[in-house]
Amino acid sequence: MEKLTLAETYAIMSKYLQVNTSTYMKPHLKQAQKIFEKAYAENTDALFRFAYYRISDREQALDIVGDAFVRFWEALAKEEVREPRAFLFKVTRNLIIDWYRKKKSIPVQDFGETAGPAENAEKFMDMFAGDLAGADVLSEARLIIEKIRTLEPIYRETLYFRFVEELSPKEISEITGEHTNLISVRVNRGLKLLKAALRI
């Protein structure tokens, strides 16, 4: 899987530190600092992958992830974060929606559609090439991603969170603000639609 380069990681951190150097170094925020560093180490690649999957623009994806971590720190400093991973995905998702709203040329409900399905599938699967064994597996994975992109946005996003990022229905509901039962229904319906598209 493609990783953020060290330079890109430092770019994200420096953006964060420029905004928050004064608060980051205060002694009473040691616990928040530990939570931040753990969440950063565990989630940076997944957040970047999610942002890149949605907008197909590496630099914009990096900016969005950097902004998400700035907001994460600000919320941590105010003790407003219960679930760091869900919080970070929710903020990243909202920043992506804001980015599309600013563009105005693409309906928000269709965000993530700046390139054709085949092109997006190719770019996205390149991130996983190192984790997949053999050309056949990679080819099948590309086909699945292509078919996922033909689903309605609500199913596409839910399946992405559930099976690519391996989030639980509860975590997905915290990100989207929707009930856990609704998320479970969407996962099941999305899988049925995907199987029908794949003819399996």
Image: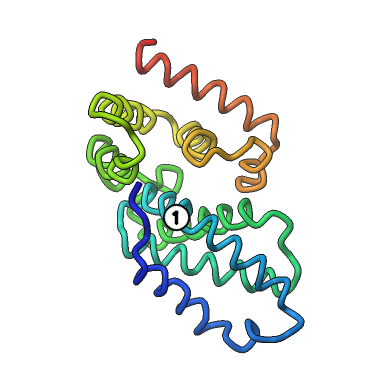
Q: Position of residue 8 (x, y in %)?
A: 36, 68
Q: Is residue 30 left or right of residue 142?
A: right
Q: Residue at x 58, y 82 (%)?
A: 20
**Residue at the (54%, 63%) spot, across then down:** 40
Residue 59 placement: quadrant: bottom left
The tally of labels here is 1
Above or below, comparing residue 53 to residue 179 in the picture: below
| Residue at the (51%, 35%) spot, across then down | 154
What is the x, y in percent for residue 21?
A: 57, 86
Q: Count neighbours of disc 1 (C-alpha within 10 A) and say few if under 14, some if 14 to 19, many if 20 or more.
A: some
The answer to which of 147 and 40 lies nearer the viewer is 40
Q: Residue 57's spot in the image, x, y percent?
A: 30, 57
Q: Is residue 171 above or below residue 30?
A: above
Name the residue: 36% across, 18% down: 197
Residue type at numbered disc 1: Asp
Q: Return the residue found at the far bottom.
A: 22
Looking at the image, is 92 positioned above or below residue 118?
below
Residue 53, horizontal then vertical, whole percent:
37, 47
The answer to which of 6 and 149 lies nearer the viewer is 6
Q: Secondary structure at mark 1?
A: helix
In this rendered view, identify the residue nearer to me: 101 or 21: 21
Identify the residue position indicated by label 1 in the image. Answer: 45
- Left or right: residue 150 versus residue 178 is left
